Image: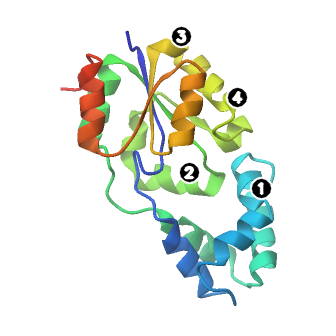
Amino acid sequence: MIRAIIFDLGNVIVPIDFSRCHTALSKVCPYPPQEVPHRIRSAGLVESFETGQISPPEFLRAVSRVLEMDVGEMQFWELWNSIFLPDTLIPDEMLAGLRYRQRLLLLSNTNAIHFAMVKERYLLLSRFDDCVLSYEVGAVKPSPVIYQEAVARSGYQPEECFYADDIPAYVEAARREGLDAVQFFSLEQLQKDLQARGISWE
């Protein structure tokens, strides 16, 4: 029996488009959009930021260095947060219905700046009982550590936890930890997967 529902954030709850950020950053640095993510990732900055190893100011300084750009803090965070699109993929009323019957958790590879903005912009995140965030846990998916933390905070056994993520490797990692995990493709597909497990939100 499923007692806890765990959702990924990006492209499950909130739609994201990384190319928006890459294009925006290319306008304030000498590199084209397609080279921006390569330069940031090759320096190991994303994982360091998403595991909480470096602070937001340190991240800004490091990105400014590898992209050879000079922008203010507020401008940079606006560009960095441009990946998020306005409309959520799962409606608020569905989350409310799920939370009424099961414990509801968020599990995300994210960073302090992205999550602060997401909480402010998408009020439906208040529906979640707990948020398991990579930069707080110190581990990113597909590390077993972050799934184990999510299960621990659910208060239930792994097999009592349903998990949805849009990335196949992260779904498989969750399954290895004993969670009932599915890949998210669409709201309709998610609803069918929940209904197949006897989970209602109405």
**Position of residue 140 measured from the top left corner of the image (x, y, whole percent):** 67, 41
Q: Quadrant of the C terminus?
A: top left
Q: Which mark is residue 142?
A: none
Reading the chain from its start, which is encountered first: label 4 or label 1? 1
Task: Estimate the spatial distance between the alpha carbons at disc 3 and disc 2, rounded to whole Å.
Answer: 27 Å
**Residue 10 visible to an observer of this rendering:** yes
The residue carrying mark 3 is: 157
Residue closer to the observer: 27 or 60:
27
In this view, 2 is above or below 70: above
The residue carrying mark 2 is: 115
Reading the chain from its start, which is encountered first: label 1 or label 3? 1
Q: Quadrant of residue 27?
A: bottom right
In the image, 14: left or right of 96? right
At label 1, which amino acid type do we have?
Answer: Ser
At label 4, which amino acid type do we have?
Answer: Val
Check if mark 1's residue and mark 2's residue have beta carbons within 8 Å: no
Check if mark 1's residue and mark 3's residue have beta carbons within 8 Å: no
The residue carrying mark 1 is: 55
At label 2, which amino acid type do we have?
Answer: Phe
Task: Estimate the spatial distance between the alpha carbons at disc 1 and disc 2, rounded to whole Å.
Answer: 14 Å
Taking the spot 54% from the left edge, 80% from the top edge, the residue there is 23
Mark 4 against mark 2, which lies toward the viewer?
A: 4
Task: Estimate the spatial distance between the alpha carbons at disc 4 and disc 3, rounded to whole Å.
Answer: 15 Å
Q: Which mark is residue 145?
A: 4
